Image: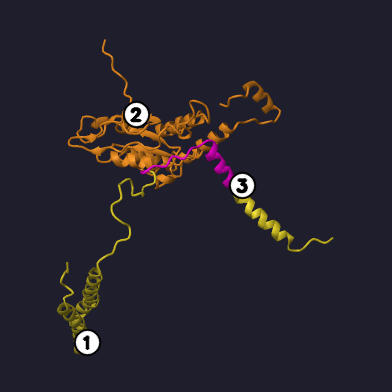
Amino acid sequence: MKPNSYLFIVIFIGVALVFPLIPLALAWLWRRIFQPPKPGPQKNAIYECGVESLGEAQIQFRSQYYLYAIMFLIFDVEAIFLVPFAVAFTGLPVGAFIAILVFLLLLIEGLVWAWSKGCLQWER
Amino acid sequence: MSEGIDEVLRSKLQQQGVWVSSMQELYNWGRKNSIWPLQFGLACCAIEMIATAASRYDIARFGGEVFRPSPRQADLMIVAGTVTKKMAPQIVRLYNQMADPKYVIAMGACAISGGPFKQGYNVLKGIDRYIPVDVYIPGCPPRPEALLHAFMELQRKIDEQKLSGANKAAHLDSEQPSEFPVPAFGKHDLEPPANPDVFHPPKLERV
């Protein structure tokens, strides 16, 4: 009789199950017979390099940090464009000067708007 | 050493190509050749420990190169350096967080006794006051060869541990503790100054 062609898959599944189960069963037997488990409050505690952990892991950061980061970005972008502008200032035409003034005005406008909204006030 | 097998019979069998072993021997053989130390240095001795792990001295030859940054995966704590009283509770807590079986090597004069800082107000006079130490290495700092020697001594110690019976290994004995009390800061010193269950200093008898 010709065996079913899917038989070897069934055998494979069987081997795939037994192969990891044998070491797991051996480890379980070893623990049962020889090595008693010794859990404890400190052994089960959260590992923080030996220091006792304080508070919860899930904490919320103030959204104001985000606003401050955005404010910082204004000055950051300004510096990136202003430094090369200042280095090449003497060789630039009047059009470039006006362009950088418009650019500065846009950023300063944003800063003034944020300031008037109270973004620089650290709310408690 | 395996009980129950006559050594003469064993060597005779080995000559015939039959290798006899016991479960205890296999267990200890596997454990002693794969000791994972905790990646943990306190002072100048840690530099010697790093040298031991590096290519020239190469602790990997003895199966101890896998320095783990977490106590959960470590078998061996090498207390390498001066233990200040500020650090002592953290060391005991790390030791407690290690999984059994666990071993301790006290490396250097400071770790075994306080060393040159023994008279200092802020240095612990030996980590064996709070946790059981398996191997002590004198020296200030001990050379990497000394650490390798201590490592081999520890391997010898592991090899002789019993799997069953009255004097079986501590981690196999449900009566033996796996955690030790962490000292806290008192008014003047760590409280308690030593764990009486662990610390057995030699008694001086003046004649």
Q: Which residue is mark 2?
A: B197
If you read the primary sequence from the N terminus, does the residue marked by circle 3 or circle 1 appear first?
A: 3
Seen at 21% across and 35% down, the residue is B189
Q: Which lettered chain is shown in orange?
A: B
| Along the viewing direction, whichever of B163 and A97 lies nearer the viewer | B163
Q: At label 3, which amino acid type do we have?
A: Ile
Closer-to-camera residue (A32/B114): A32
Q: Secondary structure at mark 1?
A: helix
**Residue linked to disc 3:** A22
Chain letter of the residue carrying label 2:
B
The magenta segment = A23-42
Q: Which chain can be seen in yellow?
A: A
From the top left corner, tell me how far across and down residue A63 is, in percent. Answer: 25, 70
The local secondary structure at tag 2 comes to: loop
Answer with left or right where residue B187 lies relative to residue A7: left
* Colouring of the image: by chain
- Give the x, y percent position of residue A74: 22, 76
How many C-alpha atoms fall within 10 Å of the one at disc 3: few (<14), some, or many (≥20)?
A: few
